[in-house]
Amino acid sequence: MKALITGASTGLGRDFAIALSSMGYDLILVARRKKLLESLKAELKTNVEIISLDLGSTFNCAKLYEQVKEQDIDIVINNAGFGLGGEFVDTDLEKELDMIDLNIKAVHMLTKMFLRDFVEKDKGYILNVASSAAFQPGPLMATYYATKAYVYSMTTAIYEELRRKKSKVYVGSLCPGPVKTDFFKTAKVEFKMPTLDSKFVVDYALKQMFKRKTVIIPGVNMRMGYYLGKIAPIKTKLKIVYNIKK
């Protein structure tokens, strides 16, 4: 058994690696920071291959796939991504374009390339890490919310295509609320709401993935918020999202 995890050096990606290794999976861990990957590898008991790449480059996404495509991979977790806080008129355009490259283009490319292989052998799991941000626009983090909406929308659409073909391949999206990781430091944002423990999110996500749950929302509060959000007027949701940030 083998799993590939992007953004594996910290946060959710790191905890996915620890959890899957404890379940007996050999791992391919991908991230920019090689030293952090090496440190993580030393902690794990299964076989681990580390690949240091910046997946914000479409060339590197293709390079990664070509490097590992001959291996019998069972699980792909598209976790790499980052956020950026601030009003849209003030945020840095280059950083936003980098975010689009990583949060959208990399997930799109890796999902498509590995999905084709999984469909051919009629097995495999692809878990795309989206966010509860996918469910509504996000003032003060407009671009980040939009990127996660793309991941959620694409992933659920693929699910329906596979379902109609009676494919045994799983594709699902993980949509957590705020999680205790380095995300907030990178995004330069703080939420006025409780955050979830990363290990809890990962354990819950894997259980739901193996149950073939299409949309995975850890935490009772976030699940309640998801259903309430379906009936709330858009202007009300915009005010709520704005006010939970500072």
Image: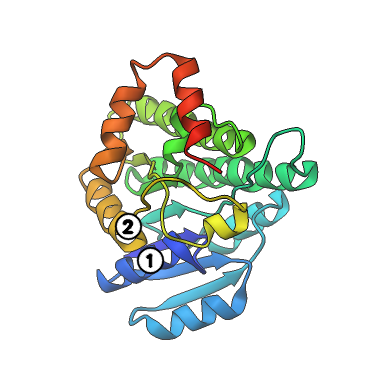
Relative to 225, say whether 74 is above or below. Answer: below
Instruction: Report the front residue among 127 and 197.
Output: 197
Q: Residue furthest bottom?
A: 42
Residue that label 1 marks: 15
For the N terminus, the image quarter is bottom left
Q: Indicate which disc, 2 or 1, sits on the residue closer to the N terminus.
A: 1
Relative to 178, say whether 215 is above or below. Answer: above
- Helix or strand or loop: what does disc 2 sit on? helix
Q: How is the image coloured?
A: rainbow
- Helix or strand or loop: what does disc 1 sit on? helix
Residue that label 2 marks: 202
For the C terminus, the image quarter is top right
| Residue 198, position as x, y percentages in the image | 36, 60
In screen coordinates, is 35 left or right of 74? right
- Asked if the residue under mark 1 is in contact with the one under mark 2, i.e. CB atoms within 8 Å, the reply is yes
Residue at position x 34%, y 78% from top? Answer: 46
Q: Residues within 10 Å of mark 2 (few under 14, many from 20)?
A: many
Q: Amino acid at mark 2?
A: Val
- Name the disc covering residue 242, or none: none
Would you say residue 168 is visible in this rendering? no
Instruction: Report the front residue among 228 and 153.
Output: 228
Residue at position x 53%, y 76% from top? Answer: 37
Q: Residues within 10 Å of mark 1 (few under 14, many from 20)?
A: many
In screen coordinates, is 229 left or right of 37? left
Q: Quadrant of residue 180?
A: bottom left
Q: Amino acid at mark 1?
A: Asp
Relative to 67, say whether 34 is above or below. Answer: below
Would you say residue 217 is visible in this rendering? yes
